[in-house]
Image (cartoon, grey):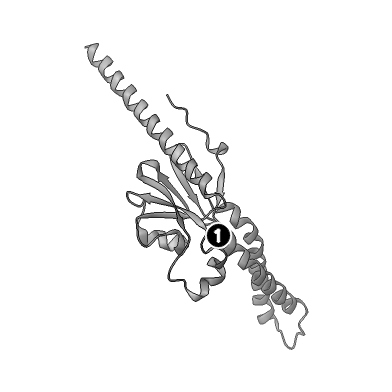
Amino acid sequence: MSKLSSPSSEPKHMLLLYARLFSLWRGPALIVAVIAGVLAAWAPAALSPMSVRIPLAGVSVLSGVIFVYAFIGPRLSYVQCRPNHLLLSTSLFRLAISYNRIHTTRPVPFDPAPIRWSDHRLVGPFLGQTQVAMDLNRYPISRRWLRLFLIDYLLPTNFVGLQFLVRDWMSLSLNIEAHRAAWKTHQRDRERKEALTSLTVKRRF
């Protein structure tokens, strides 16, 4: 019987688009936090009464939290093979995809079109790089819901599936295929064992 690996032993493949997104947040969040904090703490009372200082302090704290979170977010945004499913994790959303849903994986260029003007800084550094396209039989949840929780560029427009831009696309692709094969072998072994058990129980009667 094939032995499935433990989740902790499997590599986490960081999603580069999320890492880039969080890096773009850090600078603006820090600037807003500092400016709002300075105005809340040291602006003359005549120019900044308490009714204004308190909201400014709140903005400063919130921006500071976003700045700190922008360093944590990339570590929470990854793809990882688990024994029974592929885990897609972002900072606010986690999706388990059964290997039974995965049809195949293949390399494709990252060349989204059209690109919104507001996204050029996000996707520009990655244009032309190779990413992993994963064809699915069907989505685990509605595509409409996925669009609410995922960056659009993870969802292809010309096939049912997902696409992952990571540092080592070949490693991720091989990792997925190896786990799919191990999972299928495990399922066949379990079904064979259940069938033998069923025959044994029937013969006793």
- Secondary structure, mark 1, is helix
Q: Is residue 168 above or below residue 119?
A: above
Q: Position of residue 33 (x, y in %)?
A: 69, 71
**Could you tell me which residue is drawn at 37 percent across and 45 percent down?**
102
Q: Is residue 44 left or right of residue 127?
A: right
Q: Amino acid at mark 1?
A: Tyr
Q: Within 10 Å of the Cα at label 1, are there few (<14), some (14-19), or many (20+) other Cα atoms?
A: many
Q: Is residue 13 above or below residue 186?
A: below
Q: Position of residue 154 (x, y in %)?
A: 45, 59
Q: Position of residue 76 (x, y in %)?
A: 57, 52
**What quarter of the picture does the N terminus occupy?**
top left
Quadrant for residue 189, please give it: top left
**Could you tell me which residue is drawn at 57 percent across and 65 percent down?**
125
The residue tagged 1 is 18
What residue occupies the far bottom of the structure in this picture?
46
Is residue 93 at all visible to an observer of this figure?
A: no
What residue occupies the far left of the structure in this picture?
205
Is residue 110 at all visible to an observer of this figure?
A: yes
* Number of numbered markers: 1
Q: Position of residue 55 (x, y in %)?
A: 64, 76
**What quarter of the picture does the C terminus occupy?**
top left
Q: Is residue 19 left or right of residue 103?
A: right
**Could you tell me which residue is drawn at 38 percent across and 46 percent down?**
104
* Of the pair 203 and 4, the residue shown nearer to us: 4
